[in-house]
Image: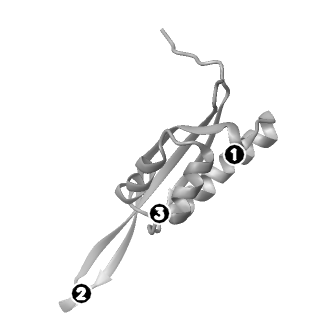
Amino acid sequence: MMNESKSPKIRATAKQIRMSAHKARRVINQIRGRSYGQALMILELMPYGACYPILKLISSAAANANNNMSLNKANLFVSRAEVNEGSFFKRFQPRARGRAYQIHKPTCHITIVLEEISR
């Protein structure tokens, strides 16, 4: 049985963001369930580097809601926000005696879903 709500869901996805999923989840957990205005305020004041791409993504989702569905940004809230691990960029660091160590640079995929606040 599917649970379908009547409010439209607006989604924005960012893929291959160059940071670890753990660091992005630390920020995402703070804004999940908050209103659009509160989420923007929190992201602007938090001192983490992960805030900038998440702030851009929430702004993009709100712009999608405004342009595609004609919804007011003030009536939106973050209904779902998730961070998944992406692939690793693999680089090699030269070491002593001709050896090479592999460096893994992690990426993540961030998905944010906004919904309209039902009154």
Q: Nearer the viewer, mark 2 or mark 3?
A: 3
Of the numbered discs 1 and 3, the one sitting upstream in the chain is: 3
Mark 2, secondary structure of its residue: loop
At which x and y percent is residue 48?
44, 67
Q: Residue furthest left?
A: 97
Residue beneath disc 1: 62
User: Which residue is at a point 39% across and 52% down the rendered structure image?
Assistant: 25
Asked if one can make out residue 108 in the rendered structure from this viewpoint, the answer is: yes
**Alpha-carbon neighbours of circle 1 within 10 Å: few (<14), some, or many (≥20)?**
many
Of the numbered discs 2 and 3, the one sitting upstream in the chain is: 3
Mark 3, secondary structure of its residue: loop
Of the numbered discs 2 and 1, the one sitting upstream in the chain is: 1
At which x and y percent is residue 37?
62, 49
Residue beneath disc 2: 95
Q: Quadrant of the C terminus?
A: top right
| Three-letter code for the amino acid on which mark 1 is drawn | Ala
- The dot on residue 81 is none
